[in-house]
Image: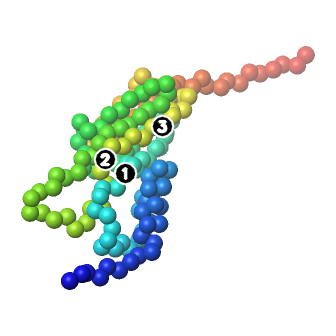
Amino acid sequence: MSTLIRWNPFQEMEAMQRQMASLFDWPQTRPGLVSTAQESLAPAMWTPLVDITEDGKEYLIKVELPGMQREDVRLTMEAGTLSISGERKAEPEEKGRTFHRVERAYGRFERSFELPEDATTENIKAEFQDGLLRVHVTKNEKAQPHLIEVKID
C-alpha cells in the first residue's frame, strides 16, 4: 500500500529562501509561516542574533547563544575586527526515539564586527550567562574640543 503525499510547489522555494537568508544574515524565520510534514529533518544553518548598543563609555554587543556553554564560544580580535565563533551541537540520536520535527538549528557559526576607531581593543571584556554573551568594548577618551577666542586688531 502506498501513501499519498501532498505536493507543496513552494517547498523548494522556501528551502532556497532559508539558505539565502543564512548567507546574508537575514532572520531565518517568518512569522506565520506554515510548515508541512515533508520538511527536511536535517538541522538548518544558523546565525546567532546580535544586539549592539553604545553609551558614552562603551559599546555593548549582546549575542543570543541558547543551549551553549561558555567553553563552546571563542572571541578573537585581529586588525580592528572582533570575531565571535563557536558550535552548537545537535542532540545525539537515541535508539527508540523518533524525531518528528527539528526546528532548532545547529552547527558552526562565526560573526565578525569591525570596531569603530574610538574603540579600545586592549580592554575588551566578555561575560556569558544563561545563553547570553555580553561583550564590553570600552571607548577611547576623545580629545574634548575647546574654544579658542580670536581677537581682531
Going by the numbered disc 1, the residue's amino acid type is Trp
Residue farthest to the front, as pictured: 1
Between 145 and 7, the one nearer to me in the picture: 7
- Residue beneath disc 1: 46
Q: Residues within 10 Å of mark 1 (few under 14, many from 20)?
A: many
Query: Which of marks 2 and 1 precedes in the sequence?
Result: 1
Task: Please tell me whether mark 3 or mark 2 is closer to you in this view.
Answer: 2
Residue 139: x and y in percent read 49, 29
Label 3, label 2: how far apart the Cα atoms are: 20 Å
Q: Are marks 1 and 2 in contact (CB under 8 Å)?
A: yes
Query: Which of marks 3 and 1 precedes in the sequence?
Result: 1
> Which residue is at 34% across, 48% downward?
64
The secondary element bearing badge 3 is classed as strand
Label 1, label 3: how far apart the Cα atoms are: 17 Å
Between 142 and 64, the one nearer to me in the picture: 64
Tell me if 73 is positioned left or right of 16 in this view. Answer: left
Going by the numbered disc 2, the residue's amino acid type is Gly
Image quarter of the N terminus: bottom left
- Residue beneath disc 3: 113
The secondary element bearing badge 1 is classed as loop
Q: Residues within 10 Å of mark 2 (few under 14, many from 20)?
A: some
Residue 3: x and y in percent read 25, 81
In the figure, 143 relative to 56: above or below?
above
Residue 84: x and y in percent read 38, 37
> Which residue is at 38% across, 77% downward?
7
Q: Which numbered disc covers residue 107?
A: 2
Q: Quadrant of residue 145?
A: top right
In the figure, 91 relative to 13: above or below?
above
